[in-house]
Amino acid sequence: MTSSLRIIAVANQKGGVGKTTTSVNLATALAACGRRVLLVDFDPQGNASTGLGVDEDDRAANSYRLVTGEVTAKTAIQKSNVAGLDIIAAVVDLSAAEIELTTIDRREFRLADALQSIAAGYDYIIIDCPPSLGLLTVNALCAAQSVLVPLQCEFYALEGLSQLMRTIASVQGDLNRRLAMQGIVLTMYDSRNKLSEQVANDVRTHLGNLVYNTVIPRNVRVSEAPSFGQPVLIYDLNCAGSKAYIALAAELLEQEKEAA
């Protein structure tokens, strides 16, 4: 891998926490900042692909065929509808890879190995993980240098996080020693809801500097954008959700600069 490339896995085994929305819009914001970005849709639901306007008929070369060795990364990459942002799309067949990979050599490293050949072409590779802690997520964690965790501002937010942290620690210990925590981003924050504020305070109390200052609000424009095959930054640049993802990208870039 090139020294300047950052590979970030966006992971949370709970569904509905804003994981794909964060993957798509963070990747878009980084591209808007002039970075060369690849988004790997590694969720069998394929929502990131849909959210970037990739029609299901245009996904013949996809992340499932990539990890099973049927196509190369170069073949699987396609342009998205965002300048500077490429994508490797996903199809529902990817769910079968959880079983198929169990009998393949280097089963945890199929994605890492596949991305080696195209690493020089990008500044960032963002991997949108499935909402599980199975072999696909382990592949993403073995390919990545860091993990970004979207955490919904709801009552059980911290409960699921401990399980994810154990998986990350296990991968760090056994498979990928360079893996680090990129940070935790609070999503679906509702300023009118006392619970959102309480959860945000609890998470910051428990996890301190791991939590980004930027909070992603509940925002109808963010919810509408995928149905138009667009990131919210393209759909409505001036809405609260877009401004939050731009702020998150700026915070991440500043974090990278300080770490350099």
Image (cartoon, rainbow, N blue to C red):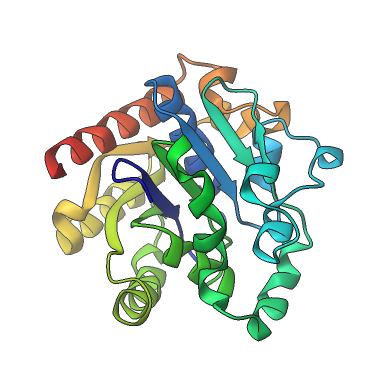
- Residue, x 54% and y 29% (percent of image)? 85
Residue in front for this viewpoint, 53 or 39:
39
Give residue 66's position: percent from left, percent from top: 67, 57
Residue in front for this viewpoint, 138 or 209:
138
- Residue, x 49% and y 61% (percent of image)? 112
Give residue 9's position: percent from left, percent from top: 44, 55
Residue in front for this viewpoint, 95 or 78:
78
Q: Is residue 146 above or below residue 189?
A: below
Can I make out residue 165 in this image?
yes
Can I make out residue 218 in this image?
no
Q: Is residue 59 above or below residue 209?
A: above
Please identify the quarter of the rendering in which residue 236 is found.
top right
Please identify the quarter of the rendering in which residue 86 is found.
top right
Q: Is residue 169 above or below residue 127?
A: below
The quadrant the C terminus occupies is top left
Give residue 122's position: percent from left, percent from top: 44, 36
Task: Residue at the far top: name it.
Answer: 238
Specify whether 111 is left or right of 189: right
Specify whether 228 is left or right of 223: right
Specify whether 66 is left or right of 150: right
- Residue, x 22% and y 59% (percent of image)? 202
Q: Is residue 71 above or below residue 191?
A: below
Task: Residue at the far right: name it.
Answer: 57
Number of numbered markers: 0
- Residue, x 67% and y 54% (percent of image)? 63
